[in-house]
Amino acid sequence: MARRLIESQEAGDRGKAVRMMRYAIFIAMVLLLGAPVSASEPLVGVASVIDGDTLEIHGQRIRLYGIDAPESRQTCKRNGEDWRCGKDAAFALSDKIGRKPISCETTGESDRYGRIIAVCRLGAEDLNAWMVRRGWAMAYRQYSEAYVGDEATAREARRGIWASEFMPPWEWRKQDRNQ
C-alpha cells in the first residue's frame, strides 16, 4: 500500500513537471514570436512576395534595402503598349525565390509602414542586387548607393523596365497620391 502511494505521488510529480515544461515552452514561443527582429539576427524562412521590393516571412513584412521596384499597379510603356511592369517585377522575384528559404539580414530599422528593412539572400546571392541587375528595380539613391552599379548594368543591357518608358517608382507613388 505504501509502495502504491509513493508510485502514485511520483507519477503525479512527473505529470506536474511535464505540464510545467509545456507551459514554459508555450510562454517562450509566445515571447519569441512577438519579439521584434534585431539587426544581428537574420530572419530566415520561406517568403511570400508582396511586390517587387517587399516580402513577408513568418508574418513579418520586409522592405528590401536600397532598392525601389515599380508598384504592383504601376504600368510602363513598351513598344507603344502599356504593360504591368509592377506585376512583372513581383513575378520575377517570386519566380526567382520559389519555395526556397531565404535569409534576410536586417538593418535594425523599419520604414514608415513598419516593414523591417533588410538585405535578403537566396543562398549567397543578394536578392536586392539581383532585382536591380535584372532591371526589375532601381537603386533607391535616397537611402543607399549600394546598387547603383547594378542599375547601370541593367540600364546598359536594357533589361526589365529599362527596355521601356517608365516613371521611377517614387515619382509614380507621388503622382498616384495626388490623383
Image (tube, rainbow, N blue to C red):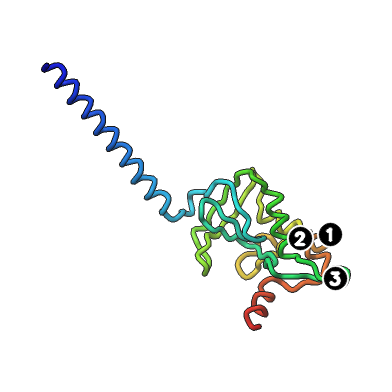
Snapshot quadrant of residue 9: top left
Crowdedness of circle 1 by 10 Å Cα count: few (<14), some, many (20+)? some
Residue mark closest to the camera, 3 vs 1: 3
Name the spot of residue 170 as percent of width and height, x first. Answer: 66, 73
Q: What's under tag 2, amino acid-wise?
A: Gly
- For disc 2, the marked residue is 135
Name the spot of residue 171 as percent of width and height, x first. Answer: 68, 76
* 96 with respect to 44 (left or right): right
Callout 3–callout 2 Cβ contact below 8 Å? no
* 40 with respect to 155 (left or right): left
Residue 73 appears anywhere in the view? yes
* 13 with respect to 127 (left or right): left
Q: What's under tag 1, amino acid-wise?
A: Ala
Determine the CA span between mark 2 and mark 1: 9 Å
Give the structural element (helix, strand or loop) at label 1: helix
Q: Which residue: 14% across, 21% down?
A: 5
Crowdedness of circle 2 by 10 Å Cα count: few (<14), some, many (20+)? many
Counting residues from the N terminus, which is met first, the one under dot 2 or under dot 1?
2
- For disc 1, the marked residue is 157
- For disc 3, the marked residue is 81
Q: Which residue: 71% across, 62% down?
A: 87
Quarter of the image that includes the N terminus: top left
